[in-house]
Image (cartoon, rainbow, N blue to C red):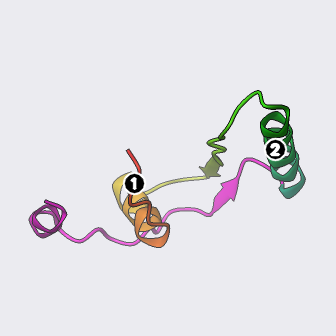
Amino acid sequence: VRRRAARALPAPEPHTGGALLPAFTAAEHEYAVRRALAYIAAGDIYQVNLAQRFVADRVDDAAGLFAALQRRHAMPFAA
């Protein structure tokens, strides 16, 4: 199915918009990871889906940006 879908769609153009900037600082991300690990250690949860939000000053082609991110960071089991 993936091969047929890939053939059916034109190749996405590379992202040419503004810079992508993380919404978390490195320290904030580290804190979030430590907090999640503490919840796991306490037995409150058994897994975490810690997401990172990025912002851009402009996006010329949202679909192209998504495709570029997907190629660079493959997630074979993503929903």
| The stretch drawn in magenta includes residue 12 | yes
| Rendered position, 23 above or below 13 | above
Q: Which amino acid does label 2 sit on?
A: Leu
Magenta segment: 1-25
- Judged left or right of residue 79, residue 25 is right
Residue 38 is drawn in which quadrant? Answer: top right
- Judged left or right of residue 76, residue 7 is left
- Would you say the residues marked 2 and 1 are in contact, meaning their CB atoms lie under 8 Å apart? no
In terms of depth relative to the viewer, which is nearer, 32 or 11? 32
Q: Name the residue under label 2.
A: 37
Q: Position of residue 59 (x, y in %)?
A: 48, 54
Q: Where is residue 11 in the image (x, y as percent from the top left)?
A: 23, 71
Quadrant showing the N terminus: bottom left
Badge 2 crowding class, 10 Å Cα cut-off, few under 14, some 14 to 19, many 20 or more, is: some
Q: Name the residue under label 1.
A: 77
C-alpha distance separating marks 2 and 1:
23 Å
Q: Position of residue 56 (x, y in %)?
A: 60, 53
Quadrant showing the C terminus: top left
Number of callouts: 2
| Rendered position, 23 above or below 60 | above
Q: What element carries label 1?
A: loop
